[in-house]
Image (cartoon, helix red, strand yellow):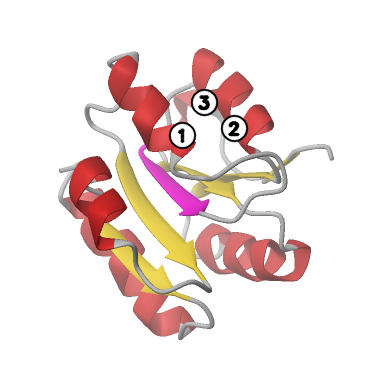
Amino acid sequence: MSEKSSASGTVGSGKKKILIVDDDHLLTKTIDMGLRNRGYEVKVLYSAAAAVKSLIHEKPDLIVLDIRLPDCDGWFIPELMRELEMAEGVAVIVMSVLDPDRTMITLNKPYAFIQKPFDMGEFIRLVESSLAAGGK
């Protein structure tokens, strides 16, 4: 599938860049609208392959990542970023319908794990606190 970027914000705008990687179009549309309304620059991608291609060219401040992606296990993305030394300064929020995998969380150290379905207010608070922490 193709990618979708928000119309607001430019690369030089100083807005925080958030990459959403999830194949649930309704959820990503809701998240995209909620984040754009708060002034963030948002890019939505629907597969791990598209996310990896995007990360080669631009570094987001935050990645919101589903674990169950159509082309691979979503944990591949933070693992690859660590291997390629691209993870510094990039926060990751993992979201999934699955129960948290403590081993993968310990290994990949995402900023947070949120289980679907989730409260949008709680999600926005996680996004804001992760960005304030600067990817740590």
User: Quick check: marks 2 and 1 in contact, CB under 8 Å?
Assistant: yes
- The vertical placement of 34 against 67, above or below, is below
The answer to which image quadrant residue 32 occupies is bottom right
Q: Is 32 on the left or on the right of 17, as rendered? A: right
Q: Which of the two residues, 68 or 39, is positioned nearer the viewer here? A: 68
Q: Which residues are magenta?
A: 61-66
- The vertical placement of 123 against 89, above or below, is below
Residue 119 at x, y percent in the picture: 45, 86
Q: Is residue 111 visible?
A: no
Instruction: Say which label, 2 or 1, has the lower sequence index.
Output: 2
- Tell me, for residue 33, which label it has, or none: none
Q: Residues within 10 Å of mark 3 (few under 14, many from 20)?
A: few
Instruction: Identify the amino acid type marked 1.
Output: Ile
Residue receiving disc 1: 77
Q: Which residue is located at x 51 percent, y 54 percent?
A: 67
Instruction: Identify the amino acid type marked 3.
Output: Val
Residue receiving disc 2: 51
Q: Which of the two residues, 94 or 26, is positioned nearer the viewer here? A: 94
* Foreground label between 1 and 3: 1
Residue receiving disc 3: 11
Instruction: Identify the amino acid type marked 2.
Output: Ala
Instruction: Say which label, 3 or 2, has the lower sequence index.
Output: 3
- The vertical placement of 53 against 71, above or below, is above
Instruction: Say which label, 1 or 3, has the lower sequence index.
Output: 3
- What distance separates the C-alpha of mark 2 from that of mark 1? 8 Å
- What distance separates the C-alpha of mark 3 from that of mark 2? 17 Å
* Foreground label between 2 and 1: 1
Residue 101 at x, y percent in the picture: 33, 62
